[in-house]
Amino acid sequence: MIRVENVSKSFGTFKALDGLCLHAGEGTVLGLLGPNGSGKTTTVKVLTTLLSPDSGDARIAGHSVLSHPDQVRRNLGLSGQYAAVDEKLTAYENLRMVGRLYGMNRRTAAARAHELLSSFRLTDVAGKRSGTFSGGMRRRLDLAGAIVARPKVVVLDEPTTGLDPRGRLDTWDVVSSLVADGTTVLLTTQYLEEADRLADHIAVINHGRVIAEGTATELKQSAGSERIDVVLRNPADLAAAAGVLERAAGPGIKAEQDPQNLRVSIAAPEGHRLLVRVLSELEDRALPVDEAALRRPTLDDVFLQLTGHAAAAAAEAQASDGQAIEAPAKAGVPA
Ligand SMILES: Nc1ncnc2c1ncn2[C@@H]1O[C@H](COP(=O)(O)OP(=O)(O)O)[C@@H](O)[C@H]1O
Ligand SMILES: [Mg+2]
């Protein structure tokens, strides 16, 4: 449903897109993840026919942005980086207007507006001027506007940037329900957690080209194996515990000691099997443990490795992937 084929786009001498390739199958979410200035909005503009590429082509539902821009627009809904609603109109009037602009008759446009107000939880404020809305409500209204005509493909450019956590969760719900209805979504984001939650497939871009892609799981696996973190009760036990971890992990694997947090950690290609061995060994040697966890690499680790700097929202997106041993995240042992 979405195909970007070797697209380049320069502004003057600056290459904003540099041989970009992307694709998304029907009913899936493609997450375009990249730091500020990496080319996300430029990609969105090419896909939505607002900018034409210098070279390459892009297709929406099989239609080329170069040769059939009208067909592209007919199959596409866009919610831009900044929510575009008419502040003087009510929520209902905004949506009805969009329906009318798409050529629906009055009755159909009104019915569609009511339907969307309901599914975006805006019925209670249907008669209120959208200028009075919070960022989250405005965003929901803008998203509703993007799908009035039931497009096959919806493009969302940083749909949750600037939203509070509640607004972000609401938006995630909306995206999930779109996909459940079979819509294909391209979503750009700077938030790793958002890509992790919503995207079936993630393309990490920097300087206008794809530097890594795959499912969230695949990307995390590419960042290396799981790690074991053990927090000790007594500072004096740190070195002895590191020795236990290293012997359990096998030759050549070094433990890291973090005296400030009384933590030792080590790569654990064997996952929880190693954790069980480590814990029983520490117990045998009377080295009391306060916390022990098997931690999968997060998208933050991936992003850091790939781009050399932390994601813009690293702190916010801080993953809750550290799993306490009482609640192991994985049922099996990695092959
Ligand atoms: N119209 C333009 N003229 C000149 N430079 C631009 C223009 N649009 C974008 N750029 C530059 O191209 C790069 C990519 O921009 P953009 O696609 O908006 O990034 P993102 O959306 O990922 O933050 C940025 O360095 C930006 O300054
Ligand atoms: Mg942008």
Image (spheres, helix red, strand yellow):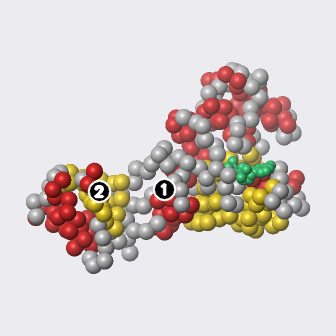
Q: Amino acid at mark 1?
A: Asp
Left or right side of 195 for 95:
right
Image vertical order of residue 249 relative to residue 7, above or below: below
Secondary element at tag 1:
helix
Can residue 215 be seen from the camera position used here? Answer: no
Left or right side of 110 for 185:
left
Cα separation between marks 1 and 2: 20 Å
Q: Along the line of sight, which residue is nearer the eye, 150 or 63?
A: 63
Sequence order check: which comes first, mark 1 or mark 2?
2
Residue 146 location, quadrant: top right
Image vertical order of residue 313 relative to residue 265, above or below: above
| Residue bearing the label numbered 2 | 258
Left or right side of 170 for 286:
left
* Quarter of the figure with the C terminus: bottom left
Q: Along the line of sight, which residue is nearer the eye, 166 or 74?
A: 166
Secondary element at tag 2:
strand
Instruction: Determine whether the beta carbon of the residue marked 1 sits less than 8 angstroms from the nearest atom of ligand 1.
Output: no
CB-based contact (under 8 Å), mark 1 and mark 2:
no
| Residue bearing the label numbered 1 | 300
| Number of the label disc, if any, that sits on residue 240 | none
Residue drawn at (48%, 44%), measured in percent from left and top? 316
Residue 127 coordinates in the image, percent (x, y) = 70, 21
Residue drawn at (40%, 50%), measured in percent from left and top? 320
Instruction: Determine whether the beta carbon of the residue marked 2 sits less than 8 angstroms from the nearest atom of ligand 1.
Output: no
Residue 43 location, quadrant: bottom right
Residue 194 coordinates in the image, percent (x, y) = 54, 49
Q: Amino acid at mark 2?
A: Asp
Residue 191 coordinates in the image, percent (x, y) = 55, 49
